[in-house]
Image (cartoon, grey):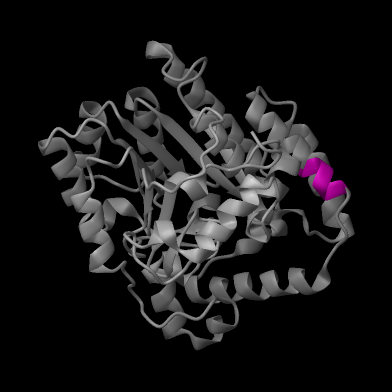
Amino acid sequence: MTNWYCPLPFRHAYIDSTGIAACCQTTRYQTTLDKWPAHPELKKLQQQFLNGKIPHNCSSCAEQEKTLGRSLRTDANRDYNNQVFSDSQITFVDYRSSNICNFKCRTCEPAFSNGISQEVKNHPSLKDFYHPTEEKTASVTDANSVWIMSNLSKIERLMFTGGEPTVIPGVKGILKKIIDDRISNIQILITSNASFTDDFWYELTESCNNLHWTLSIDAVGTAAEIIRHGTRWPVVEKNLAWMAKHSNSLDVNTVISELNVFQLKPLLKLIRQEQLNSCAPNGKQGDLGLRHQFFIIASAINWPEEQQKLLVDYLESCLELDLDSEQQDMLRGLLSRLKNHKFDLKKWNQKHKLNTALDLIRSEQHQQLFQPAYV
């Protein structure tokens, strides 16, 4: 394998309402799935990887690897057994068919939540904080939807995100076709906010051996309800516990931001407990049936000096918990970056203005999240 290689540009297509890309971290282009394999920008990206170079679009993975020792790129290499491809074949589709979502997460934006888009429309002052969006609901083109339905037999992995796939019209239809037609070659991956209550999702989990769930959970209790607005924590907590015991394959994904770094201890303890519960029945994924993975954004380490010192102490106390290796690596990487970061007042003020504006609109108090949570 070359020094810095990723298989995703050769086998994967990311698609949302803004276009198609090699993955969620790279630039979108206005094209269709049938034309994507020959797109000149994709060819350019592929050649950079074959030459062992780090494309500028891939800086996010490079930073994650410095902090966590892993990234979307390293995970992809693992998934493809470190194979090196040179041709273009779409066998893995990350299908974000709509931005319809029942949450308005503070680390999200209108392109991925029609609720946020509507909020920006109702409160024009928020336009200063988000990328421009013209529609409150945005969907992929029919041509791409038709391509997916027509190529199910050739697709090896099909990922549903959004938005929130459990509330997006059409997602159930594709899943039912896969089940009804007994298409067994597809691994189905669903990334959800764990808000569902429809029996369909539980029945699907119990009947489909090729189904992998990723639940996006950033905090526990009231903190979760502020960070991921729309959360009903008892529902999310119940679904997490159920999935830990019944899902054939399960991850929890946590976005680390300034909003939850002081709220990590209860979350780490909860996920660790569910890991232990998940391995009790049959040890589905090696030693544990639940993986806790992380994505760290820049605001997580940008703190004034006094709060930075407090946060260092808090994170070091989190390391005293019973944790898995990935949780430990995240904390150590976060501490390393935090201790070496130079405070950026401009970026701090920008985040403060956005969160204060959201507080006024949503009747919330985000600054309570900066009090260390120990329970």
Viewer-side residue, 282 vs 35: 35
Vertical comparison of 329 with 113: above or below: above
> Is residue 108 something one can see in this rendering?
no
296 relative to 92 in the view: left or right: right
Vertical comparison of 141 with 245: above or below: below
**336 falls in the magenta region:** yes
312 relative to 42 in the view: left or right: right
Q: Residue at x 50, y 76 (%)?
A: 361
Magenta stretch, main secondary structure, is helix
Q: Residue at x 60, y 53 (%)?
A: 47
Q: Position of residue 123 (x, y in %)?
A: 47, 84
Q: Position of residue 36 (x, y in %)?
A: 40, 60
Vertical comparison of 211 with 198: above or below: above
Q: Residue at x 10, y 37 (%)?
A: 180
Q: Position of residue 294 (x, y in %)?
A: 60, 42
Q: Position of residue 307 (x, y in %)?
A: 82, 55
- Residue span colored magenta: 334-339
**124 falls in the magenta region:** no
Point out the residue furthest to the bottom here.
Answer: 124
273 relative to 118 in the view: left or right: right
Viewer-side residue, 36 vs 103: 36
Viewer-side residue, 198 vs 8: 8
Check the picture and name the quadrant holding the C terminus.
top right
